Image (cartoon, helix red, strand yellow):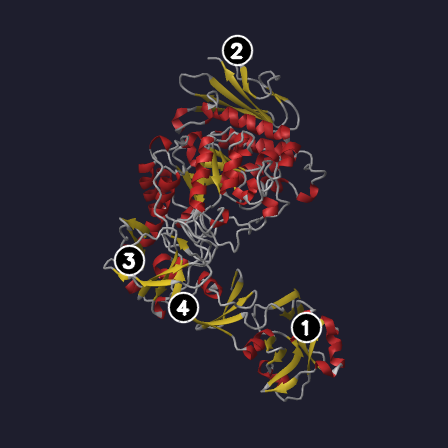
């Protein structure tokens, strides 16, 4: 069963039901939910009211509510027709309903029925009900029916909801899996040329790849939610594409494609309206797209040169989390989108600028499946790989998202910050436009014809399919050329596969040699093979996240994990130190501080004693280690999420509270100071490009420990770590003494070797 705006229930091999959250309004939601559940369906129809009542216990017919029980479901109990059955609910005292004949069900057309005025029930709102015999036996709803509630184990009730009159149940036919033989050649053949809208002379051209479609039409709209005002049949080409040339330019026009195909091709309804996969702007998740010529690429001296991978310090952030409470003069509208962040970045007081990082990893900003502009959304359910999110645009209808996002990237660059986009190419959201275009061509299918779900989001893009690969490659190249983005973080990169990731690296670095490439190396299927370490990718390090958490949480008894991190050894398969993105928290799962203590243990805005110190120790280890340190926005001021693990819908918990920054000013200043040191000339030894560049020597002295770091032609550096709650005097190496030794980072008033509680010292040694 799949949930998300409704639930999909497969009754048998050939039939299924979509149980919507409210009555069906004729939209494509049932089709989208079925596609997202990994099925192909056709013949979508609302249930007959009586059939709906047989499953859900009630239905609205005319101005009456029909409560219905099907005796065939209880043959041993109701077959004689003599057993009396009553409608019971909280508003008629449940079991006591048997005492009043008005609640007795009456025989009708082989069923037991009770009719009531619909208006008389509306004031009750949503309520639970059930059927009970005269003898007191409760009659349970049908097994597995989604529209029930189980407050306590074994007590299952029907649910009456005024928003569900009976059109909330939509039946459909499950289509069989297609024959793979018709796909083999198409999966291996990469489409050529450009797709989407283009201007040629004074005319225009539309082109889409749909080799198995029977017909494709171009639809124009005046109203994005209205009916098409023009319909133009497109011409099929020998290469499987469909195209249409018009004598006039169509820039600014709203358009969709209508794709028709045989049922066995598993495209759901026979004719489906979709958003062009290559539309450069969209008005929302359902489309339409906005016809727009490809903007001139950013070129020449305007191209931003990001830092080398080894020199990066990254902050991960969500656009609306940054803006919701930003101490800036922004309108409510500006706090929702690209323009607001562009304006704030102009100020030197902008949080990201003051933090001191040199790169920002922005959570997904391509068109996603939010239902409204105001809805908070992380962006990990994309419906387009080309169009910037209309929810972040000032005007979704004129394509302003394109110029506003381009301006935002420029604003980051003016502030000295590289832009890394978190991109999702492993699955899609609702509606599944690519699935309606050609389900089996773009998605992985199991042996039963169902969509696989190693992404955990209902479908997996088939990254072995050449049409899929071209779409992904065209997307990343468009984002680099058009917006001058500086890098990508590939969500669930394992699902993209090593071959596609290599091709992305080759093609994008032809345009931008310093492009930053980061992959999340896992999925629900497994991990990327070690061949990924022979590429120029960095990988999120779950070893850092988990082992450093264990180290600080369990009392810092064994420094092995900390010493390994300080030498870049936590991920031994790496070929280069910068291939580890060392992080303690991200948008996913708990905030780091919530893993150190319970939210309930905070008092007066402060965590329990020792928690702030443990957080400082962990962040310090990450910032003093080879690799790429990444902080989640707000981590520098102890941002928690009230102990909630998955906050993808909780804008209230994710929004940064800058008042808390003042609460933890000393902590934040300490983090910023360490970032500044890491990025300084004196801190260059923390950013080696290769493992052979430095020599390390471990020093363990009682409860404290240190690491000697030697680089040819430079002074020796010593990192001292005090993981205890008391100041420690850690002896300097023999024959070095204190003469000539100087503290280059740490408490300036401290002598070399005297380290404050839960703190660090970086010392330069002579010779």
> Label 2 crowding class (10 Å Cα cut-off): few <14, some 14-19, many 20+?
few
Callout in the foreground (3, 2):
3
Marks 3 and 1: in contact by CB < 8 Å?
no
Mark 2 to mark 4: distance in Å? 79 Å
- The front one of 242 and 519 is 242
Please give the residue where the numbered disc 4 appears in the rendered image: 269
Q: Residue at x 46, y 55 (%)?
A: 285
Earlier residue among tags 3 and 2: 3
* Quadrant hosting residue 333: top right
Where is residue 691? Give x, y as percent.
40, 29
Mark 1 to mark 3: distance in Å? 55 Å
Where is residue 130? Give x, y as percent.
66, 74
Mark 4 to mark 1: distance in Å? 36 Å
Looking at the image, is 560 positioned above or below residue 123?
Answer: above
Marks 4 and 3: in contact by CB < 8 Å?
no
Earlier residue among tags 2 and 4: 4
Earlier residue among tags 3 and 4: 3
- Badge 3 element: strand
Looking at the image, is 115 positioned above or below residue 195?
Answer: below
* Quadrant hosting residue 132: bottom right
Residue 491 is at least partly visible in this image? no
Earlier residue among tags 2 and 1: 1
Please give the residue where the numbered disc 3 appears in the rendered image: 243
Callout in the foreground (2, 1):
1
Residue 766 is at least partly visible in this image? yes
Earlier residue among tags 4 and 1: 1
- Badge 2 element: loop
Please give the residue where the numbered disc 1 appears in the rendered image: 121
Mark 2 to mark 1: distance in Å? 87 Å
Marks 4 and 2: in contact by CB < 8 Å?
no
């Amino acid at each position: 069963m799949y949930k998300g705006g409704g639930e999909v229930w497969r009754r048998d091999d050939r039939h299924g039901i979509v149980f919507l959250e409210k009555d069906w309004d004729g939209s494509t939601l049932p089709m989208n939910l079925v596609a997202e559940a990994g099925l192909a369906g056709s013949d979508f129809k609302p249930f007959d009211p009586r059939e709906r009542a047989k499953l859900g216990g009630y239905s609205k017919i005319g101005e009456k509510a029909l409560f219905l029980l099907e005796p065939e479901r209880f043959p041993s109990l109701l077959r004689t027709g003599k057993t009396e059955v009553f409608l019971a609910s909280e508003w008629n005292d449940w079991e006591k309903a048997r005492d009043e004949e008005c609640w007795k069900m009456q025989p009708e057309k082989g069923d037991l029925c009770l009719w009531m005025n619909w208006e008389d029930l509306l004031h009750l709102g949503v309520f639970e009900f059930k059927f009970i015999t005269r003898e007191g036996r409760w009659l349970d709803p049908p097994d597995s029916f989604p529209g029930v509630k189980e407050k306590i184990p074994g007590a299952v009730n029907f649910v009456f909801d005024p928003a569900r009159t009976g059109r909330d149940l939509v039946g459909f036919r499950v289509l069989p899996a297609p024959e793979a033989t018709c796909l083999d050649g198409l999966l291996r053949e990469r489409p050529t040329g450009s797709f989407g809208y283009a201007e040629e002379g004074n005319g225009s051209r539309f082109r889409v790849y749909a080799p198995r479609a029977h017909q494709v039409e171009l639809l124009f709209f005046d109203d994005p939610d209205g009916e098409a005002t023009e319909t133009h049949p497109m011409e099929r080409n020998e290469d499987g594409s469909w195209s249409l040339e018009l004598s006039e330019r169509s820039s600014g026009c709203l358009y969709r494609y209508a794709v028709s195909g045989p049922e066995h091709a598993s495209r759901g309804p026979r004719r489906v309206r979709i958003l062009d996969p290559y539309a450069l702007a969209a008005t929302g998740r359902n489309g339409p797209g906005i016809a727009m010529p490809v903007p001139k690429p950013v070129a020449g001296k305007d191209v931003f040169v990001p830092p080398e991978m080894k020199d990066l310090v990254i902050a991960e952030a969500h656009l609306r989390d940054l803006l919701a409470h930003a101490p800036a003069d922004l309108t409510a509208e500006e706090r929702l989108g690209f323009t607001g962040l562009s304006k704030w970045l102009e100020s030197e007081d902008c949080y990201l600028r003051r933090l001191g990082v040199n790169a920002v990893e922005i959570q997904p900003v391509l068109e996603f499946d939010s239902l409204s502009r105001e809805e908070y959304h992380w962006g990990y359910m994309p419906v387009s790989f080309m169009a910037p999110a209309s929810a972040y645009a000032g005007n979704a209808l004129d394509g302003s998202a394109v110029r506003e996002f381009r301006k935002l990237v420029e604003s980051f660059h003016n502030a000295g910050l590289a832009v890394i986009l978190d991109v999702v190419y492993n699955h899609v959201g609702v509606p599944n436009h690519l699935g309606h275009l050609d389900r089996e061509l773009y998605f992985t299918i199991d042996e039963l014809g169902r969509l696989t779900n190693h992404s955990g989001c209902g479908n997996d893009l088939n990254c072995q399919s050449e049409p899929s690969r071209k779409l992904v490659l065209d997307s990343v190249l468009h984002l680099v050329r058009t917006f001058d983005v500086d890098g990508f973080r590939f969500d669930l990169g394992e699902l993209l596969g090593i071959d596609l990731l290599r091709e992305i690296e080759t093609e994008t670095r032809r345009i931008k040699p310093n492009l930053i490439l980061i992959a999340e190396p896992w999925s629900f299927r497994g991990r990327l093979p070690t061949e990924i370490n022979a590429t120029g990718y960095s990988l999120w390090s779950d070893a850092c996240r988990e082992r450093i958490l264990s180290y600080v949480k369990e009392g810092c008894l064994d420094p092995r994990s900390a010493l390994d991190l300080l030498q870049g050894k936590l991920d031994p398969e790496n070929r280069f130190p910068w291939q580890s993105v060392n992080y303690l928290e991200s948008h996913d799962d708990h905030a780091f501080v919530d893993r150190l203590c319970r939210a309930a243990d905070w008092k007066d805005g402060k965590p329990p004693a020792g928690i702030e110190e443990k957080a400082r120790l962990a962040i310090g280890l990450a910032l003093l280690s080879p690799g790429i340190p990444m902080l989640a926005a707000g981590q520098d001021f102890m941002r928690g999420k009230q102990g909630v693990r998955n906050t993808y819908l909780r804008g209230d918990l994710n929004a940064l509270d800058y008042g808390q920054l003042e609460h933890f000013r000393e902590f934040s200043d300490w983090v910023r100071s360490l970032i500044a040191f890491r990025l300084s000339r004196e801190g260059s030894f923390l950013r080696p490009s290769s493992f052979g560049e430095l020599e390390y020597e471990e020093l363990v002295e009682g409860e404290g420990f240190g690491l000697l770091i030697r680089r040819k032609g430079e002074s020796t550096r010593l990192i001292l770590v005090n993981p205890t709650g008391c100041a420690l005097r850690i002896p300097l190496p023999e024959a070095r003494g204190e003469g000539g030794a100087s503290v280059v980072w740490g408490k300036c008033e401290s002598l070399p070797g005297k380290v404050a509680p839960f703190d660090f010292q970086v010392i330069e040694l002579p010779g």
